[in-house]
Amino acid sequence: MKHNNQLPGEHFRKDWQLRVKTWFDQPGRKKSRRIARVKKAARIAPRPIDGLLRPAVRGQTLKYNTKLRAGRGFTLEELKEAGIRRKEARSIGICVDHRRKNRSVEGLQANVQRLQAYKAKLIVFPRKANKPKKGDADAAAVKSATQFKGPLLPIVQPANEDIERPMGEAPKVWAYAALRKARSDKKLKGIREQRAKEKAAEEKEKSK
């Protein structure tokens, strides 16, 4: 700064405390979330803590379709194959999505197996203890039942088996190597012809 001028005194840092974001409520929010989880588990008991059973579906687009993820609900075709009625499914903790359609036999069979595995472990409580209906669990099973904690039939990513494929016998000609050699021969053709002429001329001079 030149000359004997007054020093600038702009106040650009006014009220900065109002624009600072703090996170002092982190421990309190953590405790609130924990209490809410405990209350929800007690409210939905003896149903599983993880909630409703969801299907294994493929992600959309080429970027994500190699991975399996949890979908919105099982299709009507999957429920029919597993022998579960549409209205019954929601009452025993199974999500239903009437809009999704099965595009492959493999996906259909995988979700049917998922439903069957869930149904085999299911304990259905009777609405009236003294009047159990068909499909309800007996008194001993109801008494021994506990609330399931943890992920409900977690989705496992299938192993990729298409990484190495058998090629049979080795090819007689490698296309890449052949192309590289042809390109190199074309590039060095003139230089090689010139060297050959010079070498022939040298041998002719020596022979004299």
Image: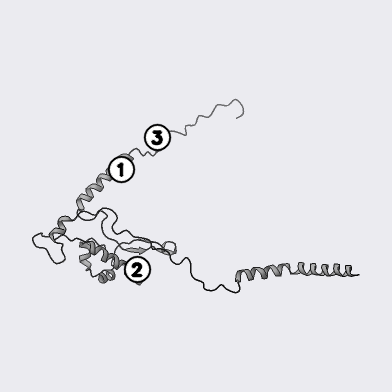
Label 3, on which residue? 17
Q: Residue at x 15, y 55 (%)?
A: 143
Q: Is the C terminus in the top left, top right, bottom left or bottom right quadrant?
A: bottom right
Question: 19 or 3, which lies in front?
Answer: 19
In the picture as drawn, the residue positioned furthest to the left comes out as 130
Q: Tell me the element at label 1.
A: helix
2 or 3: tag closer to the N-terminus: 3
Marks 2 and 1, how far apart in space? 39 Å
Q: Can you see residue 82?
A: yes
Residue at image coords 88%, 67%: 206
Disc 3 element: helix
Is 26 positioned to the left or the right of 93 in the image? right
Residue at x 42%, y 61% (from the top left corner): 64
Which of the numbered marks, if any, corresponds to residue 107?
2
Name which of mark 2 and mark 1 comes first in the sequence.
1
Q: Which residue type does callout 2 highlight?
A: Gly
The amino acid on which the numbered mark 1 sits, given as a three-letter code, is: Lys
Name the residue beneath numbered marker 1. Answer: 30
Foreground disc of the pair 2, 3: 2
Name the residue located 80 percent from the left edge and 69 percent from the top edge: 196
Q: Which mark is residue 93?
A: none
Crowding at mark 2 (Cα within 10 Å: few <14, some 14-19, many 20+): some
Mark nearest the camera among 2 and 1 is 2
Amino acid, disc 3: Gln
> Where residue 130 appears, x then y in whole percent?
8, 60
Mark 3 Cα-neighbour bin, 10 Å: few <14, some 14–19, many ≥20? few
